[in-house]
């Protein structure tokens, strides 16, 4: 009985970690390449979720059916966002970082306003795949499992893409050393755009899955930005395996602390871990130390 | 250097003419059947900010009442006028605005704002200016235990919310109860009242833990409730956490015999979002469009025709508050705030919510009851108390699909 409970808590934690990882992967690729913390990330996730909920209610189209189109649309939005707004950042690195925060902050509020105008402030949620599979006395929540599987899949694809393709190597070069990469003839601007294309595409995928797990309204996006950001820091900037591992650790922490301690302590975990990592291992679990 | 603005004279002439035209136009608009100086009723409402959605429905209740009364000739032969500021869901803003309503706008009467937190702040203003304030959107009893004399609760108090769910549990022989909810002021007050009332009813509270606002995970609390294995889960939840907890309980494979969410499961879109899993869920409301109180059917019909959407319970509460104020003004025969206060403290007034009456010492509502609702086949029916029940409660609770 007790072992079964512990297994259940591990499963719950890992699945929650999958949900977190999904939110974090897109943020990580953008942050890794451009050093831009996309503060509008959560709002883009929520906007996608709100669209999923509307399509489900009006036309009975499930979020899983929306997913491929949402990813393509998200990639489009990411491309446009980078080309129109973030391309215009000042040259100087530090000024650029501050300005990018202000821009994405502005975008996040624009998106909240837009979502409120279209979807109102009502809370939405998609009532699809809300049950569990029960295997050997352990319950595995269906929607969370899909989010978990998708997160693993995306992290694997990103890893292959980055290691084994020319574009991927260029992306990595751009994230490690801008000047060196430029000297090697890599089009840095193109890499920056690409990181947004991929990052927002993944955010849209996350939105589809999260639409079945949480209840959300246009105001709830920033919560996901925060959790995603602490995972990026925990796992290491630019490390996708790190993001998945970090998210899994956080999920387990929330699950176990929430059960054996209380849920208040549990929900503090992402931020506690965030501060501890910054203090003791600023490069993250799998990140490489910056000289 | 300050440069004096020197406009040509014709500009000021045009400006004054425009101003005059505006004044005439606004003056002309308020006049319905009633004549004379309007009775101005001041309030603030959360038209923006965290409480905006509910706040807007509350305001519509006031507005519809004023519209309806003006068609009938107003009060004391004078038309009514509502003076509203947006308090942005912020107690401090509301406080300043109420002072402005009294000191600068010289309103004749005031009525309460939206939410317990905002009302608690402005109750002091009511006392300071000795202006009685009917407060239809404060269910928390705490603000009334501070010795203030001019604030009157015009809704059912939070402890009432759980009475029905406990009565139903008891009637079905359920013994053990898990109490949970969001750890913020209003749900916390309901949860505390639930624990107290459950024990008084002779049932066992075997689990009592709140979860934080904006929780990203409900599986831990659901898992704990499953381990405690109670007959009934009584939860003080808003909408998003009601959905989160409901799903987590289902995914954990736990089926309590009774599942109650105050107040999150009451909203009409709960079923829309949750679907069949909502069937059998109990919730609470202070009002129902089906309620057989005097004037309720006419209110629902008139309101829906006027705003092209049905009222919610906030609209009904605010409408009812002005019904009570009307009874007071009519009885007193003038805008005498001291006499109106005494009337509000001691009288019984039938409204669309039920019969208004308060404890004269604290102003806490005694007359209004809370209704217990249950989703059955996609509709939210009153199942308790018996005198208002539309359906019998369906027990025990079961998940529609597993």
Image (cartoon, rainbow, N blue to C red):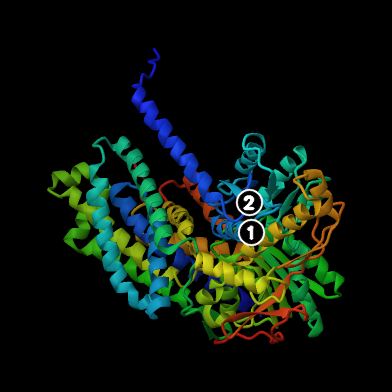
Q: Is residue B398 above or below residue B350?
A: below
- Chain name for mark 1: B
> Looking at the image, which residue sits at the far top?
B1
Please identify the quadrant where the N terminus of chain A is shown: bottom right
Estimate the x, y position of residue B15 in percent, counting from the top left: 40, 31
Element under disc 2:
strand
How many numbered marks have been drawn onto this rendered protein structure? 2
Element under disc 1:
helix
Estimate the x, y position of residue B392 in percent, counting from the top left: 72, 86
| Residue A188 visible to an observer of this rendering | yes
Residue position for label 1:
B69
**Residue ID at (45%, 35%):** B19
| Residue B218 visible to an observer of this rendering | no
Asked whether the beta carbons under mark 2 and mark 1 sit within 8 Å of each other, the answer is: yes
Q: Are marks 2 and 1 on the same chain?
A: yes
**Residue ID at (58%, 86%):** B377
Residue A242 horizontal side relative to residue B325, left or right:
left
In 3D space, how far apart are the residues under numbered discs 2 and 1 (Cα atoms)? 7 Å
Q: Is residue A131 above or below residue B361?
A: below
- Chain name for mark 2: B
N-term mark: 2 or 1: 1
Q: Residues within 10 Å of mark 1 (few under 14, many from 20)?
A: many
Image quadrant in which you'd find residue B252:
bottom right
Please identify the quadrant where the C terminus of chain A is shown: top left
Q: Nearer the viewer, residue B160 or B277?
A: B160
**Which disc, if any, is residue B80?**
2
Q: Nearer the viewer, residue B347 or B271?
A: B347
Residue A51 horizontal side relative to residue B223, left or right:
left
Estimate the x, y position of residue B304 in percent, counting from the top left: 54, 69
Q: Nearer the viewer, residue A204 or A1?
A: A204
């Amino acid at each position: 009985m007790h072992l079964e409970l512990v297994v259940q808590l591990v499963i719950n934690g890992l699945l929650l970690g999958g949900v977190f990882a999904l939110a974090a992967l897109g943020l990580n690729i953008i942050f890794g390449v451009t050093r831009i913390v996309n503060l509008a990330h959560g709002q883009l996730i929520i906007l996608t979720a709100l669209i999923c909920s509307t399509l489900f209610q009006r036309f009975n189209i499930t979020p899983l059916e929306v997913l491929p189109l949402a990813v393509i649309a998200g990639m489009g939005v990411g491309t446009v966002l980078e080309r129109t707004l973030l391309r215009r950042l000042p040259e100087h690195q530090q000024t650029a970082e501050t300005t990018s925060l202000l821009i994405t902050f502005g975008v996040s509020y624009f998106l909240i306003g837009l979502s409120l105008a279209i979807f109102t402030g009502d809370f939405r949620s998609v009532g699809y795949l809300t049950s569990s599979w029960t295997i050997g006395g352990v319950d595995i929540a269906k929607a969370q499992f899909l989010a978990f599987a998708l997160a693993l899949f995306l992290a694997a694809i990103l890893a292959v893409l980055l290691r084994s393709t020319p574009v991927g190597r260029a992306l990595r070069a751009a994230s490690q050393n801008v000047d060196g990469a430029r000297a090697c003839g890599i089009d840095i601007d193109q890499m920056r755009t690409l990181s947004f294309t991929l990052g927002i595409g993944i955010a849209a995928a996350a939105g589809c899955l999260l639409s079945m797990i949480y209840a959300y309204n246009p105001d709830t996006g920033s919560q996901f930005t925060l959790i995603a950001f602490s995972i990026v820091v925990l796992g290491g900037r630019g490390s996708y395996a790190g993001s998945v591992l970090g998210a899994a650790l956080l999920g387990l922490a929330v699950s176990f602390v929430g059960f054996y301690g209380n849920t208040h302590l549990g929900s503090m975990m992402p931020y506690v871990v965030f501060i501890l990592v910054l203090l003791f291992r600023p490069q993250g679990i799998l990140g490489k130390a910056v000289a | 250097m300050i440069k004096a603005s020197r406009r040509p004279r014709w500009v000021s002439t045009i400006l004054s003419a425009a101003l005059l035209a505006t004044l005439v136009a606004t003056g002309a608009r308020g006049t319905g059947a009633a004549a004379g100086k309007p009775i101005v009723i001041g309030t603030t409402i959360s038209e923006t900010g965290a409480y905006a959605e509910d706040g807007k429905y509350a305001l519509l209740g006031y507005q519809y009442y004023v519209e309806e009364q003006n068609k009938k000739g107003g009060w004391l032969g004078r038309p009514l006028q509502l003076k509203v500021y947006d308090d942005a869901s912020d107690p401090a803003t509301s406080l300043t605005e109420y002072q402005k309503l009294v000191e600068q706008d010289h309103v004749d009467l005031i009525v309460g704002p939206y939410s317990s937190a905002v009302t608690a702040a402005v109750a002091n203003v009511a006392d300071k200016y000795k202006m009685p304030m009917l407060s239809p959107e404060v269910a928390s009893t705490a603000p009334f235990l501070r010795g203030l004399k001019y604030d009157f609760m015009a809704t059912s108090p939070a402890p009432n919310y759980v009475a029905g769910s406990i009565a139903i549990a008891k009637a079905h022989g359920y013994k053990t109860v898990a109490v949970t909810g969001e750890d913020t002021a209003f749900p916390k007050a309901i949860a505390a009242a639930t624990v107290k009332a459950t024990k008084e009813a002779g049932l066992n509270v075997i689990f009592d833990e709140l979860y934080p606002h904006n929780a990203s995970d409900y599986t831990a609390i659901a898992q704990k409730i499953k381990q405690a294995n109670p007959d009934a889960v009584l939860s003080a939840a808003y909408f998003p956490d009601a959905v989160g907890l409901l799903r987590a309980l289902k995914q954990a494979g736990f089926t309590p015999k009774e599942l109650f969410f105050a107040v999150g499961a009451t909203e009409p879109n709960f079923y829309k979002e949750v679907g069949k899993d909502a069937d059998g869920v109990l919730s609470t409301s202070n009002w129902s469009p089906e309620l057989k109180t005097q004037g309720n059917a006419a209110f629902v019909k008139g309101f829906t025709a006027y705003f092209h959407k049905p009222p919610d319970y906030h609209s009904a509460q605010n409408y009812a508050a002005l019904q009570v104020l009307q009874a007071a003004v009519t009885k007193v025969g003038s805008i005498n705030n001291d006499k109106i206060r005494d009337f509000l403290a001691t009288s019984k007034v039938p409204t669309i919510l039920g019969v208004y009456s308060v404890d004269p010492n604290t102003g806490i509502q005694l007359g209004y009851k809370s209704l217990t609702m249950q989703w059955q086949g996609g509709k939210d029916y009153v199942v308790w108390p018996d005198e208002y029940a539309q359906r019998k409660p369906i027990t025990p609770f079961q998940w529609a699909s597993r």
